[in-house]
Image: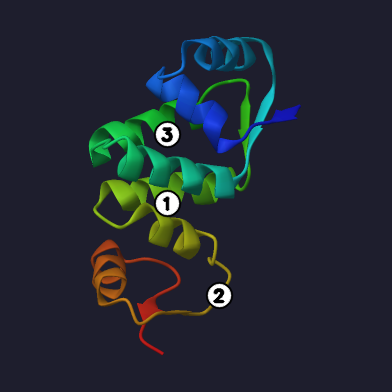
Amino acid sequence: MLAVDTNVIVRLLTADEPGQTATAVRLFEAESLFLSKTVLLETEWVLRRLYGFERPDLLSALRHIVELANVTCEDEPQVWQALDWAAEGMDFADAMHLASSRSARRFATFDRALINAAKTAGTTPPVTSP
């Protein structure tokens, strides 16, 4: 299994560097790949902030990558939960942090937007201010 970095996924999804894109395509076609949650977080940030991907297109692209048969994703159930919460309007990084904290009794933050989004989504654990 081969773990890939953010830039490999970005090349695959943006095709902005022809040589690197061709290599990324070959990797995704021929290798068993591992994606860490941190790589997915960084990929989301890069595509949103630097490439201007809109939320629906961005989440669709991440879902497509995660569901590929040759891709193993770290803590895949948490990743899917984070993608679902992000589709409901929660920030993807916040959703990933929260989904990764399922065994906690509570998730504390000063971020009012996260508290409100989590309340709307009915998350577990509940999100509150400290």
Horizontal side, residue 12 vs residue 103: left or right: left
Quote the CA–CA distance across marks 2 and 1: 16 Å
The spot of residue 6 in percent (x, y) is: 54, 36
Q: Amino acid at mark 1?
A: Ala
Location of the C terminus by quadrant is bottom left
Q: Is residue 109 left or right of residue 78?
A: left
Q: Nearer the viewer, residue 38 or 67?
A: 38
| Disc 1 from disc 3: Cα separation | 11 Å
Give residue 102's position: percent from left, percent from top: 53, 65
Point out which mark residue 104 bears: 2
Q: x, y percentage for residue 91? A: 32, 57
Q: Is residue 70 above or below residue 78?
A: above
Q: Nearer the viewer, mark 2 or mark 1?
A: 1
Q: Is residue 85 above or below residue 73?
A: below
Residue 8 sits in which quadrant? top right
Mark 2 or 3: in front is 3
Disc 2 is placed on an element classified as loop
Mark 2 or mark 3, earlier in chain? 3
- Total tally of numbered discs in the picture: 3
Q: Quadrant of the N terminus?
A: top right
Q: CA distance from mark 2 to mark 3?
A: 26 Å
Instruction: Give the residue type that dot 2 points to.
Output: Ala
Query: Residue at left 58%, top 20%?
Result: 69
State which quadrant residue 27 falls in.
Answer: top right
88 relative position to 109: left or right? left
Of the numbered discs in the image, which one, if any, rests on residue 82?
1
Mark 2: give few (<14), some (14-19) or many (20+) Cα within 10 Å.
few
The dot on residue 62 is 3
Q: Residue 90: x, y in percent?
A: 29, 57
